[in-house]
Image (spheres, coloured by chain):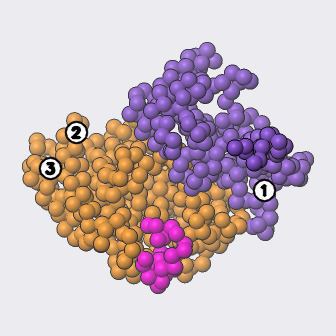
Amino acid sequence: MRPFSYQRASDAPSALRALQGAAADNIPLTEASAQPLAGGTTLIDLMKLDVMRPQTVVDINPLSASWSAISLDGGNLRLGALARMSDVAANPEVQRQYPVVADTLKLAASAQLRNMATLGGNVLQRTRCSYFRDVSYGNCNKRHPGSGCAALQGFNRTHAVLGASDQCIATYPGDLAQALIALDAVVEITGRSGVRSVPFAQLHKLPGQNPQLETTLVPGELISAFTIAGRWPRSVYVKARDRQSYEFALAAAAVALDVQNGMVQDARVALGGVATIPWRAREAEALLKGQKFDDGLAQRAAEAAFSAAKGSQHNTFKITLGKQVVARALHQAAAMEV
Amino acid sequence: MTDPIDSRALPLFNFSRRKFIAAAAGTAAAPLAARAAGEAPSSAVAADPAAPVDLSMRVNGVNKALNVDARTTVLDALREHIGLNGTKKGCDHGQCGACTVLIGGRRVLSCLTLALSAQGEDILTIEGLAKGQQLHPMQQAFVDQDAFQCGYCTPGQIMSALGCVHEGHAGNDDDIRESMSGNLCRCAAYPNIVAAIRQAAPAMASEQKKG
């Protein structure tokens, strides 16, 4: 790990000052010379790998006092960005009213990592693409824009089948983000000029020609909270992986349904483990809405969710697997007693 | 045929590996401990990022003042600077669980936690569990159930197992396995680790009642 100077932020303004002061406008957020430290489960790991090389680490954990609350007010859920994954997963109201949120957290990482990692850090988790994580590969457009993508012609079994470009096929690795995008969560972002709110779907950027630009956050901004309007008791997360626990998704689906008298009034479907960013499957949702739920409908929705999918040499199995995961998640959600 | 080298005749081999490592670590840590002594701990911001910084850690109820590189993790601080090498370094990337300790009562990975950011927290390591010669119920259960072979992952397993019980996931074998999935054991002592946690959970509950 390269040397860095450590700053412990006493409050939000001092954290934002430290982060913005060291940031240049023309470089990606993830390359900014000052990086915020929350749980550290991504940042310290990537610093040890020499993938991230901040000169200043700004410890924002003292902000937990005001940024880690879990509250349900007037039917809306508000999750502080510094809430730990394990605390949110164990919250009885989250489990009851937003099971998909609790599921994504419970099925992610290990107990120790969930005790450390925060929600804000989790949604910004960097890809697990092994060519990104191994700096001995020179050609990674995320690390060195314009250098090429080693995964395109390399071993790409875990890579994305949706949202990829000819510059990057790295999979977005997280789980919580699928629940948040499915439930139309809003991201509250605190910057030096105040607080702005954006739909979760606008947080992550497709790789396109600039895979190094992963989010719409700018240096000097921090995610301070997520909010979800309404309640989604009929919701689940199904995650298929190489082993039963402590593994990233090969294919996952976050599903939330509103079913009245057997008819689907509203449907939310988001995909994990298969796309370059948290992926909302709106084609599947459109197919489900207003229809009577049955197995045929679930299968057609699953097909629709992957209609734009494009496999690479080693990962086409994800398209088949992903459809089955979507269908299973739809069945599980439809069968829930709420 | 006789052994050409009688190892018993060589004094070096009378020195056990553990004693040798302990002695070597002690020598290495001594100058640092001497430098840190008497200096007021603070969360200093170093102008030169490579310059050592002062920090204090509370480990097993004892305050430790250190003067270390800002890059030092809790794991390296424990092992290299405080001389508590019960906590093990496996992968050093948060994947194996060997370095698990309790910080603020929660099980976390000491290899991904900066010592600087753990200041002011209570850190509990494997060395802090026994009361004199009296093993903690979880330690005793690991012995009783033969829950290890080589023993390298064991301190992390035991600290993680405490978290598993505290978090209420020791009720059945499936729950224990899921809750302990962050601790790898290459000797595959998993069935016995599950049995140890099943044994220790009620003993911990009754100890807690006794206060």
Mark 3: which amino acid? Val
Judging by the rendered image, the residue that carries numbered circle 2 is A336
**Residue B144 seen in the figure:** yes
Mark 2: which amino acid? Met
Q: Which residue: 63% across, 49% down?
A: B89
Furthest toward the top, the residue is B210
Residue B68: give its label.
1
The purple-coloured chain is labelled: B
The 10 Å Cα crowd at callout 1, few under 14, some 14 to 19, many 20 or more, is: many
Camera-side residue of A18 and A124: A124
Total number of numbered labels?
A: 3
User: Is the residue A117 above or below the residue B105 in the image?
Assistant: below
On screen, residue A261 versus residue A307, left or right, reads: left
Residue A198 x/y as whole percent: 40, 64
Q: Which residue: 48% across, 83% down?
A: A147
Residue A147: give its label.
none
Helix, strand or loop status at disc 2 = loop
Q: Nearer the viewer, mark 1 or mark 3?
A: 1
Which residues make up the magenta segment? A129-150
Chain A shown in which color? orange
Subunit that carries the residue with mark 3 = A
**Same chain shared by disc 2 and disc 1:** no
Helix, strand or loop status at disc 3 = strand
